[in-house]
Every structure is written in structure tokens, then in C-alpha cells.
Amino acid sequence: MKYSTEFLKSYICDVLKAVGLTEENGRIVAESLISANLRGVDSHGVTRLPIYVKRLQTGAVTPNPNVQVEQESDATLLIDGNDGMGQIVGTKAIELGVEKAKKNGAVYIGVKNSTHFGTGAFFIQQALKHDMIAYAMSNAPSTMAPFGGIQPYLGTNPFAFGVPAQKNKPIIFDMATSVVARGKIISAEQRDEDIPLGWAIDKEGRPTTNAKEALEGTVLPFAGPKGYAISLMMDIMSGVLTGAGFGPHINNIYGDFDKPQNVGHFFQLIDVNRFMPAEHFKMRVDQMIDEIKSSPKAVGVEEIFLPGEIELNTEQERLNNGIHLGKEVYESIKLVGEEVGVSIDNFKLQNRRDLR
């Protein structure tokens, strides 16, 4: 069955409120999860609700963190996330960063004592509303070996960037530094499906298509040594520089339930108005997009896409037609709601128009 975004947001928000989040904070996390589903990144969508709730219940995550600026200068912010949910901490970081970038032209934002922040695109979209060029990155628990190794040291350490446009869709790029986000392997394992060869190796270092073996082994960096180098730099910026955990010193979201994760993030915001009027800049971006879209196509190619364009198309389709939840995902979010006293069946009765 398909569900409207508002139905899912309301339900998820109520579940999160039941484990201690305020309405505002619950809404931020719900919007992040729904944003991932809308963009087609279902591995980072509502399927994450049960693990988020479990970590909140065990006390590993602060439901309503007191996010503090620990150090700052004209062009930098170091933020302590108080072990709050990454979506809440990251949203506050972007809010403070936009204010400083508008005042000083650009800002670098380091974050420590945070948790899994969902998709980087969620924060990029917040910054684009203010005519910022934006970069977002995060580190993650060890699931990827250094190139040539078999023991996980680095995380899948995602990074994202975004550029505003005028009449065209903005350019939004968001990826893990592994061949594929580990969440997709987790999803495959939950569905008892194989994964493509080249995504991961088992604990002995052998290529595998078995999702369970892959989770016991290590995911592979994209583009071999290049992806490894980029992942390393993401961890240096997000972890080493900020004072957060790094490499194997970040606690596992699916274990270590008595410990905070101490994930780190790093953001950069650039106010385009410091280079030229934003409207002029966005017109030039439009020109670039139009020229790329109209450039000659290879045999068999129907359309050339810009980074993030397919995801934005998917978002519009799902906004119009609803978000499909598979049976396993639906049952998992239904169960976690029941455990905290929130019934999705009651939501169905109250929101029949929000079912598709």
C-alpha cells in the first residue's frame, strides 16, 4: 500500500514523541526519514525508525539535545551535539551556519557528539533555500577496510553537495564513499536477497553476493583506492578535526546500545551573493544545465541527467502518488509504534484520505 507523506510524518512524529522527543524535534527526524523515501533512498527512510527508537529507549541518544557552540570564529563553528539525533543536530548546525555565512560570506561547521544523520541531501536542501552552495559530510562506524585490507576501519562516510538554480531543479549530489551504502546491504539481508558482485567481500576477503556474509565482512570503496582516499578525508574532516570519534572509535548504531555513537559531521556553506547576485548566479547555473541536457547523447541514451535530478523526479512522483512501503517495513514500523503506545491502525482510521 502507498501512504501520503503527511500520514507517515504524523505517525513517525507521534512514535518519536512517545519516546521523549518534542513535537519540533520529532518533526525534524520524521521529515528526514520521509525525505529519503521521497527521493527513492528507501534504505535511509522510515525503515530506520525501529533502530532510532531502540537507541532512544536505551539512553544512547539524547531525545532533545542541548546543542551548543563550543568554539567559533568569523568563518568557523564547532558544535557539540550532546549525543542528539543527527538530523536534529545537523539542522541546528545548518541554521547557525546560514546565519554566519550570510554575515561573513562562508562558514565551515564541525560537529561532534552526534549520531547517524540520515541523508546528506536533507541538509543540502535546507541550505539551498538560502542561496548557498553547500557541502555536507559525515563519518560512520567501521564497515569498510582500507584499500587492500580485509578488516573494517573506515565507515561508508557519505558526502553531499548542492548548487541552487533558477528555473531548473537544483543540483544535489549525495553518495556514500563505498560502492553502495551499507543500508542497502542490510535491506537485502532483511529480504533474503543476494547483492551484486563487487559490493562487498566476506570476512576472509573473498568477493561475495551473500548479504549476510557481506555484513560480516566489509563493504568496498567506490573506485578502489580513489574511494578509499576520499572516505579517509571525510573521516579526517568529520572525526579527527572536530574531536568526534573516527575509524573504529565510533560506536555501532546496531549495537553498543549503552554508549553514544560520537559520530562527527562537517558542513561548508558559501553565500553566492559574495561573488555575484544570487539571481545572476542561478541563471548561469541554468545555462550550464540546459547546455548539458541538450548535449549529444550516446547510443541508447534517451536523456542526460544532472546529479540529483532522478531523485527529484522520484520525489515529485511520490509526493503525487504516495510512498510505497513493503510488508516487512510496514510491519516493523507498526510494531515499534505498538511498543510505545502508538497504533498505526488508529492513524489509518483517522486519516483515510491519506492512504493511496
Image (tube, rainbow, N blue to C red):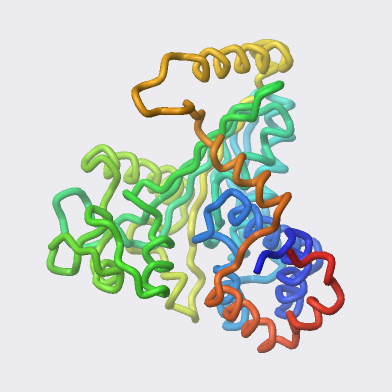
251 relative position to 270: left or right: left
The N terminus - image quarter: bottom right
Q: Is residue 35 above or below residue 212?
A: above
Q: Quadrant of residue 21?
A: bottom right
Q: Is residue 310 above or below residue 9?
A: above
Q: Is residue 150 above or below residue 148?
A: below
Q: How many marks?
A: 0
Q: Quadrant of residue 215?
A: bottom left
Task: Say which of 346 and 296 sits in front.
Answer: 296
Residue 155 position, x and y percent, is: 36, 56
256 relative position to 154: left or right: right
Could you tell me which residue is drawn at 46 percent across and 14 percent down?
295
Residue 324 position, x and y percent, is: 62, 63
Could you tell me which residue is drawn at 81 percent across and 66 percent down?
23
Q: Does residue 75 appear in this view?
A: no
In the image, farthest residue toward the front: 300
Task: Say which of 264 and 307 sits in front.
Answer: 307
Could you tell me which residue is drawn at 42 percent across and 70 percent down?
252
Q: Quadrant of residue 66?
A: bottom right
Residue 279 position, x and y percent, is: 73, 15
The C terminus - image quarter: bottom right
Could you tell me which residue is drawn at 41 percent across and 75 percent down?
190
Residue 261 position, x and y percent, is: 48, 67
Q: Does residue 296 appear in this view?
A: yes
Task: Say which of 343 and 152 sits in front.
Answer: 343
